[in-house]
Image (cartoon, rainbow, N blue to C red):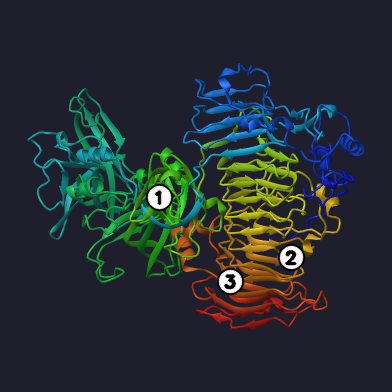
Amino acid sequence: LLITHFLPVVFLTTIVVSSSNNKASAASDKDTAIIIDSTDSTEHNNVDSSISDSVINPLSDTDLNIVYENLLNSDENKDLYFEPLVCNTDVNKEICQNFSEQNYDLSQKVVIPCGTCILMDDSSEETLHFEKGLDVQGKLLFPSSSNLKKVVTPFVFVQGIFIVEYSSEKLEFQLVGTEDNTFISHPDQIFSGCSSTYNGCSVAKKAFVVAGGTLSMHGIHPSCPYTWTKLQSTVDAGPASIDPSFLSESSAESRSSVGTSLCVDDKVVVNESFDGDLGNKWDGTGASHQRVFDGDNGYYTSIAPRVFLTNMHCLVPNVHYLLRFQYRYRSSSSEQEFEIPWVKITRKKIQGGTDWMNAQPVYSRLGGKVATETWHEYQTVIYFTEDTVDPAVTENLGIYIDPVYQAVETIDLDNFTLERPSDAYADALYVTRSCDELLVNGDARLSDRYVYPFYSTGVSGTLRLITDADDGPSTDVTKYFRSSSRTSTNASILSQEIPIQCLVRAAIYELKAYVRVVSEEEKKVSFTLNLGTNIHFGVATCPPSSNNWVLCVAKVQLTEQHELAANTATFSQLYTRVLDDDVSTVDIAKVELKYQGGRTLQLVLQQEEELGISHCWTPGSEILITSHTIRHEDSQVAKILSVTEDDGKNIITLEDPIHEPISLEQDARTGVEVALLSRNLKFTIDENDDVDNPLHGGHFIIMFTAAPVLQEIVGVEIDGFGQQGRLGRYPIHFHMCGNVTGSVVSKNTIRNTKQRGIVVHGTNKLYVSENIFHNTRGHVVVLEDGGERWNIFERNLGAVGHAVEKLISRQDTDHSPSTFWITNPQNTWKGNVAAGAGLSGFWFELRGVVRGLSASMYPDMVPTRLDLLKFIDNVSHSSAQGIQTYPSSGFIPNSPAVFENHKSYRNRNSGVFFHAGGRMSIQGGYISDNKIGVNINMDHSTVISNTTVIGYSMTYKKVVDSMGEKASRYPVTALCDEGKNDGLVGIRIDSYHDGSLFGATGSRLENVNFSGFGSGSCEGSSSLDVDKHDTRYFDTRNKMQNVQFMDDSNKIDLCKGEM
């Protein structure tokens, strides 16, 4: 299991402020009681602390618990909630005054007086900086017509009415500061807990506080009903493009000549078979150099044969020249092998003197050893510098072949050719070349003599072309590349430079090649891509070969890291070697590396009624595409370039291509979600103003404010909020508000959080819908104490959740974050998506008692025994666990907890993990591509009905295959652990069943279909198995009815349940 320890459950006592006043009782119309404490987060971390949440006053040593106890016993306090200020009774009847006409001193705290309406008018200021904060006691209206772009302030207090109308223009509130703020309520406020009498309440830094006031904030067009939808299909961008100017310049260079009529053929410099007249072009070092005939065939022999380039004036500087010759070593030495010869140049200079120098190789010099008395072939590519071929500097040039070792007495030379590549090469390399096919001449069609533009590297031996072969991989393959005389396992036997411009993220390339290792032992050939000298990534490891041809096929998907590396590298190349072998001859035929797709540029969105794409999803906006793998890191953020509607389809064109996600067209049940991230109303922080506390952002709290005071937080983008490790400091926090019927938190984006997302604390009947959470820390949508009920969470989407670095207290579990953290089941979850949590999509972490500030309000409530109100049409994917009920106190409701129509797929561990509870029911579920589909672990009386369970779906297998070897490397994307025989499990029924417990029965499966656990799945997979958790118990009352296996899936594995 992912979690192998039980989390300590510590229930802390709290001081409860209570009164005979009806408004203070749990049964009152406010639906809660007030608990206020002054303990800071450090004290909270102490397990012996009696505090679970607080309103903190660091400026005073007064114990607020005692203050409130005294308050309740006095006649001063008439209410335990902030109430609307009486002085605002007629504020909506007031004519609003222009802010620009009020002469506010922005260097001091700006107060909007109670009973006054202020309009943020169309002034000349685009940015307002409230240096000491903004306190809205009356009414403040930001109309849609305002040209204000930004408000900078250390805090905003709302005791009156705060309205931001929707505008097509952007408005940003930036919260700044490093010092904690103190909120002092208006003198007329009935609830006096934060009054000046008690020195106010500390509300921390970068605070947006609602205390008795009302919000109406709208940052999205009112006609936009949805913030996310499903991806219907995609349109591929095609491969990247090679810079046309690069191609044209390279093509011109390859075809260039010296422009003189003296060059009859300026491409062929030397073409000598030694069968005819040699003239005076050839000589050599040593006493003997001559042509020798072997029958009718001649060859040239010398200690170091040399040819003079008599047509030196025809040489073109800085272009490729192909050099090819056959050679044979002769030696009377006892040594039988010598190193491959060096190609060198002699230059006689006009001003006198001779230079002896190495030829300039385009690729690294060949290495390795060859046998004497045997003919070998040598191929290389060289070039001449401008200085070398300058007739004003050079009188003549010669190329000679240097054996290096003195023990070599002579070299026999034959079929010596020095020439430029043909125009066919130029066309393939520079005219018709594209990123569709990364390799040129992989089928050796461009020449019968040259391996060019392939080459070997280092001491990898010799590379040559075999032609007219009758032993190829098939009858139609008569040419292949052969590498021999190898002496290194690390040098590349077959390389080719690849255009760096082609190596862009998301591109999928497929390598195909036939390979043969001439060896009695089976050997594997490996292909990699190298970016520069230090970055290498695998493309394929071929099946083993022993004197037989094998087909090597594999795909590789390029990532952003590859693209970044390509941007800084000076070259890229294919690299081929034989694993653990440095001697065997290797043959390679028909090698290709072709583009297969993967770069999505257009998204076709699922048709939703009144999606409003034309005015809601606008160019320049950011969108989120959720992960299509088992890892949430594979979610993607993109920018919209354009939006169109074509034939009833909503089509989004992106600024840059992304990795192709899974669409409904590919899989009607698991297409990814696409969410709109950008909003016109945005709350941010200055990341640079509190460098000592990088985990502290802003926070947004509605505290002690119950219905009928309403809050509308709609279409707001909150970026960088939350203060990690600090209690009560979250991006959106409803704090002890009781009944908030009518309040709405909807269509907001909460991203890049420091701590949590939306926290519902001591608050009931809140409607939370259509919110997008991205890149969060800790639990995301939180029910804090376990007493929160009758809230509705509908169509919220969370993706990319991370653990916190600093916990609020030791009893919190934000280091194992969930998207939906559930402490009370008497709420509604409908149509929500957990698309990538650090641990669990939906975590029912129920406790035996209500904790924290709410504990004394519900002394008899046992959350683990409460019935689940409604859980329907939810989705969990790309997490470790889809749903889990944990820890060991268990979730055992009085009536079956029904998870209706739940989809849980592509999770790294379990799709559903029921632990140490009972009476769970999955009805109409879809479970796919999880390590374990449903893990029933010490859980009793579970019913799974009308459910589809798939092990390895064809859709996800295709995704994994497209990633190549990368899928099995960290971070792992593949479901299979190669070689471990650790397969997938559809449903795991635990053997720990004690029938004497609370009338427990065995698990029951009805109308369940299994597939994907046979061929094509992971080794060792089975649709059903029994886990050996405790061998003392094995409940034979498990029942199965109408269970079907739709393919060749392995049916059941009982081995793990053996004694």
Image location of residue 522, percent across then percent down: 45, 68
Label 1, label 3: how many angstroms apart (C-alpha)?
Answer: 63 Å
Q: Earlier in the sequence, mark 1 or mark 3?
A: 1
Q: Which residue is drawn at 64% across and 58% down?
A: 829
SS of the residue under disc 2: loop
Kindly identify which residue carries mark 2.
867
Task: Residue at 64%, 74% (x, y): give it.
Answer: 944
Quick check: marks 2 and 3 in contact, CB under 8 Å? Answer: no
Q: Which sits in the foreground, 522 or 1019? A: 1019
Say if residue 604 shows up in the picture. Answer: yes
Residue type at the position of mark 1: Val
Residue that badge 3 annotates: 924
Amino acid type, mark 3: Gly
Residue 88, percent from left and from top: 69, 31
Q: Distance between the residues labelled 1 and 2?
A: 73 Å
Q: Name the residue under label 1.
A: 459
SS category of the residue bearing label 1: loop
Instruction: Say which label, 2 or 3, has the lower sequence index.
Output: 2
Q: Which is nearer the N-term, disc 1 or disc 2?
A: 1
Q: Is residue 637 left or right of residue 426?
A: right
